Amino acid sequence: MNIDPPEKNSGEVALADWLELVATLSGDRAANLDLIADAADIAEDTEIDDIADDDAANEALIEAVTEEIRRRARVLHEAAYPFRMSANGEVLHLKNDLTYGQEAYLACLVINHSWTSGKLLAPTKLTDAEAREARNHFEILTAVAAIGIANGPAFLLGTNRRGAAGLLQRVSEICAHVGEGRARAALDPAAPARANDDSVDVLAVETENDGPPHRSFWFCQSAAGANFDSKPIINEIEKFMEIWMEVRPAHTNGALFFPAIVDDNFLRYNTRRLGQMYHRLRLPLQAQRGFELLAADAALLHYVDDVNAPKVWLSTYLARAGRGVAL
């Protein structure tokens, strides 16, 4: 299956990821939890001195991984977590008929583990071409999730391919659409000619019912690569408004979207630098909420040709990787 076997000391997050990958790529859409201990023993290639102690350690390891899977199911709810445990708690199953949020989770899982530090090995990991496409589709997931956060319109700036002039026009259209802020009448001399999005992939607006000033303009960064923690969106907001806006919105927030799972300490330490962070335990649920809002009002999403493009990309990858899962 070309998945790097886990080591027992990898931690329950990495081990749960490995189990999810096995369930995703296996022919029966399932992974037995006992596989964790078996695969880890093979990976570590160690002699077992005391079978009783080893069995107890394996049971504790499986229980820790089981609790991590339960945690994921709790925080993402039924609508956004694509796996379920069997009634006896021994097998992890990939669900049928996945929701948009569940597909977003799987996309994050595959992208995350195609990084150099991930578990997927060639040819199962994303090819260079697939990884380039993944960045574009992850931007769409970011835009849909931003709707879920803002409960208002989202605008994908990354699809602009006309440089600074096109970006200025797009900012002008956004401000006119939401009724707050105003783009510069002419390009600022400091505006880079090739600035397609100027480090802001998505703008989403959390609107007020009686009109502007709105609750917040969300400046969002979509970071599909392993260097996601080097993209502090908070540092980009002031610069973006200075270069592209004559009149600024009254309230702003920054958000970073990425496919890995990080712990609470990472979030506490980095939030002031990286913005509100939407990792794999947050993004899928917001993407599901955004998709449901879009079902009621398709006009909430701007500059995206096909909101379902990430699903098509994921299905194509799974078929190529040997699964052919019907999504």
Image (cartoon, grey):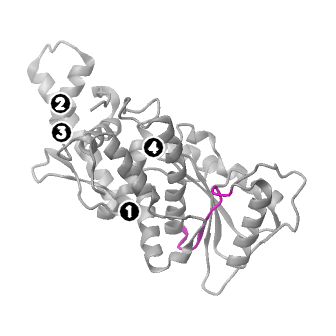
Side of 242 relative to 94 (left or right): right
Instruction: Give the magenta part as a residue range.
Output: 150-160
Secondary structure mostly seen in magenta is loop
Q: What residue did someone put label 3 on?
A: 33
- Looking at the image, is mark 2 or mark 3 earlier in the sequence? 3
Which quadrant of the figure has residue 111? top left
Q: Residue at x 33, y 63 (%)?
A: 99
Q: Nearer the viewer, mark 2 or mark 3?
A: 3
Q: Nearer the viewer, mark 4 or mark 1?
A: 1
Q: Residues within 10 Å of mark 4 (few under 14, many from 20)?
A: many
Q: What residue did someone put label 1 on?
A: 100
Q: Residues within 10 Å of mark 3 (few under 14, many from 20)?
A: many
Q: What residue did someone put label 2 on?
A: 58
> In the picture shown, does residue 58 fall above or below 13?
above
Q: In the rendering, at what x and y percent does residue 251 appear?
A: 70, 68
- Look at the numbered disc 3 and give the secondary structure of its residue: loop
The answer to whether the residue labelled 2 contacts the one labelled 3, judged by CB atoms less than 8 Å apart, is: no
Q: Nearer the viewer, mark 2 or mark 1?
A: 1
- Looking at the image, is mark 4 or mark 3 earlier in the sequence? 3
Q: What residue did someone put label 4 on?
A: 260
